[in-house]
Structures are given as structure tokens and as C-alpha cells.
Image (tube, grey):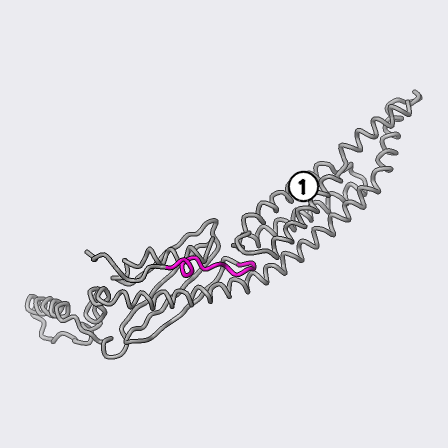
């Protein structure tokens, strides 16, 4: 059982280091190593996308007392993603070849017992025995005796690794930002074309309505007021100006978020859901099967495709 530790505790500046402004991907890899005072420590971090922060630690035996502090620091630096944090520790120099004589003796006794039982003449291979688990290594007890000093090295190495991870994630996010802004421009251009076609379709729609009513009524006189009312109702049902206005607003907000601080992935995903909703409404309001209507349908489908591609990219944004 480990005795209560009285070593240095995490400061707020260390454990909750503020994020640097900028977009971050959830994909990254980083490694940092420190070799000093006869010890070699290496911290490796791998990160992929995940809806929440899913942190997995792999620590050497004897490091359990500092695990809560490691988790606190990582959570202060990373908001989302599946993270594998692995800490490798070994002694360097002469201390690295410390032999656990009790373990080695147990292996030798077992080997000799087998030789005697089966009548084997060959001597045990000492090289093979030295490679067996626990013969050469760092006993947990030796770590515990100097854990306070080792902890400081762990925190320095962890900080360096997290800094490298942030730089890699920011570089990845920079490429994603460029791609997403290009797709946003496509969405805006497509929406503008829809608006132009919708304006062109209104008078043509009124004419088609009049022709259809004449066909249905034959020689009967058409009340101009009733015709205007019916045309107004039908035009309102097919009016897409509100959807286009909301779509433009979502695109603008999305672009602003891309220039803001980190931790915006969920907000971007919500905006894309709203953009997809507007695209679906455009499809449902497409006015008829004439040329303008078919073109609007095609453009709305292209908008949906661009939004879906944006959603794929946003899935990797923290």
C-alpha cells in the first residue's frame, strides 16, 4: 500500500493551461522523451476523432499514484477525441542492467527441475533466462522511492508531448478549414443560382396556372381576382426566399466559427444539420417539372451533397 504522498501538487496554471486560439483537428500523434539522472522517460500520444473525450492511459508499474494528475492535465488540454497516452520508463546507464536475483533463481530452479524430471543433459541457456520477464528491469519499489522526482520529469515530458500534439492538430485543422471554406463558397454560389431561378420562375408559374385553369374551365370566364389569389397562394407555397435567407445566415455563422477559438466541433455540426434542413425544404418546394424547377432540384441536391461533405470533415474537428 502506498503511503500518502506529500510531493508537489498540480497548479492551476499547469493543469488548466489555456488553449491557444485556433481550430484543432482530433487527429494527431506526438512523442517527447527526456533522459536525465539515469532515467529515460518517453510519452507517446495518439489521437483520433470521437464524440467525447475518451482517454486511455498506459503506465509503467508503480506510476499509479500520479495517474489522477496525468488525467487532469490531459483533460485541461484536450476537449474531445479518443486519446491513447502511453508512458515508457526505464533506467539508463549502469542502473539499467539491474538483475532481480530472486526471479532469476526461480527460473533456474524451474529449469533444473525439468532437466531432472525428463533426463535432459543440456545446461540452461543463461541468455534466454536473462530475457525472461522480470529478470532485468525496474522493480516497482525503486520507482516508488523516487516517484516525487520522477513525477516532475513525467509532467515536463507530458507537457512537451501535448504541445507537439496541439501543433499537429492545428496544422491538420488548417487544411480542413481551407477545404470547408471552399465548400461553403460552393453552397453560397449554388444558393444564389437557386434564388435567380426562383425569381425567373414566378411569372412563368402564374402563366402556367392560368393555362391550366382555362383547360379545366373551358369556355367559362376566369375571374381575374380569383386567378390572382390562386396564383398568390401557389407562389407562396413554392417561395424559397426564407429558406435561402436562413441558409445564407448559417453559412455566415459557420464561416465565423472557423475563425474563432477551439472546441467548436459540436456547434459546426448543429449548423450543418440546419443547412441540410433548408436544402430539404428547397427540394420540397421545387415549382413543377419545367426547366426552372428541374434546375432548382438539381441545385438543391448539389447543396445537400456539399453539406454532407462538410459534415464528414466536421466530424474530425474538436
Q: Is residue 1 above or below residue 269?
A: below
Of residue 299 and residue 117, the one placed in the foreground of this image is 299
Q: Residue pushed farthest top?
A: 220
Q: Position of residue 264 (x, y in %)?
A: 55, 52
Q: Is residue 121 above or below residue 199?
A: below
Task: Residue at 11%, 76% (x, y): give it.
Answer: 123
Q: Residue pushed farthest bottom?
A: 94
Of residue 301 and residue 243, the one placed in the foreground of this image is 243
The total of numbered circles placed on residues is 1
Q: Is residue 175 left or right of residue 279?
A: left
Q: Quarter holding the N terminus?
A: bottom left
Image quarter of residue 280: top right
Q: Position of residue 195 (x, y in %)?
A: 78, 45
Q: Which residues are magenta?
A: 11-24
Q: Position of residue 204 (x, y in %)?
A: 86, 37
Q: Residues within 10 Å of mark 1 (few under 14, many from 20)?
A: many
On whether residue 242 falls in the magenta region, the answer is no
Q: Is residue 43 left or right of residue 294?
A: left
Q: Is residue 219 left or right of residue 301?
A: right
Q: Is residue 230 left or right of residue 169?
A: right
Image quarter of residue 186: bottom right
Is residue 133 in view?
A: no
Is residue 70 in view?
A: yes
Task: Residue at 27%, 65% (x, y): give it.
Answer: 148
Q: Position of residue 8 (x, y in %)?
A: 31, 62
Task: Residue at 84%, 35% (x, y): give it.
Answer: 205
- What residue does disc 1 label? 278
On whether residue 22 falls in the magenta region, the answer is yes
Task: Residue at 77%, 48% (x, y): give it.
Answer: 193
Q: What secondary structure characterizes most of the magenta part?
A: loop
Q: Secondary structure at mark 1?
A: helix
Amino acid at each position: 500500500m502506498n503511503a500518502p504522498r506529500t510531493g508537489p501538487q498540480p497548479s492551476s496554471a499547469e493543469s488548466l493551461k489555456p488553449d491557444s486560439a485556433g481550430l484543432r483537428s482530433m487527429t494527431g500523434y506526438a512523442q517527447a522523451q527526456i533522459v536525465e539522472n539515469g532515467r529515460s522517460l518517453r510519452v507517446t500520444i495518439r489521437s483520433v476523432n470521437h464524440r467525447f473525450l475518451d482517454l486511455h492511459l498506459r503506465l509503467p508499474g508503480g506510476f499509479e499514484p500520479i495517474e489522477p494528475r496525468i488525467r487532469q492535465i490531459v483533460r485541461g488540454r484536450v476537449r474531445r477525441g479518443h486519446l491513447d497516452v502511453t508512458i515508457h520508463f526505464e533506467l539508463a546507464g549502469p542502473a539499467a542492467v539491474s538483475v532481480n536475483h530472486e526471479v532469476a533463481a526461480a527460473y533456474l530452479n524451474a529449469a533444473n527441475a525439468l532437466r531432472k524430471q525428463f533426463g535432459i543433459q543440456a545446461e540452461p541457456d543463461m541468455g534466454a533466462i536473462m530475457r525472461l520477464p522480470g529478470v532485468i528491469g525496474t522493480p516497482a519499489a525503486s520507482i516508488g522511492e523516487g516517484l516525487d522526482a520522477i513525477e516532475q520529469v513525467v509532467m515536463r515530458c507530458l507537457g512537451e508531448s501535448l504541445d507537439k500534439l496541439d501543433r499537429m492538430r492545428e496544422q491538420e485543422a488548417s487544411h480542413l478549414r481551407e477545404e470547408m471554406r471552399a465548400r461553403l463558397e460552393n453552397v453560397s454560389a449554388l444558393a444564389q443560382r437557386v434564388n435567380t431561378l426562383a425569381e425567373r420562375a414566378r411569372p412563368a408559374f402564374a402563366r402556367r396556372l392560368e393555362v391550366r385553369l382555362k383547360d379545366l374551365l373551358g369556355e367559362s370566364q376566369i375571374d381575374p381576382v380569383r386567378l390572382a389569389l390562386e396564383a398568390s397562394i401557389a407562389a407562396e407555397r413554392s417561395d424559397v426566399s426564407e429558406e435561402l435567407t436562413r441558409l445564407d445566415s448559417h453559412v455566415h455563422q459557420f464561416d465565423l466559427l472557423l475563425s474563432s477559438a477551439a472546441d467548436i466541433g459540436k456547434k459546426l455540426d448543429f449548423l450543418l444539420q440546419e443547412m441540410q434542413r433548408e436544402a430539404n425544404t428547397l427540394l420540397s418546394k421545387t415549382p413543377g417539372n419545367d426547366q426552372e424547377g428541374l434546375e432548382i432540384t438539381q441545385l438543391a441536391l448539389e447543396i445537400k451533397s456539399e453539406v454532407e461533405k462538410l459534415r464528414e470533415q466536421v466530424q474530425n474537428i474538436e
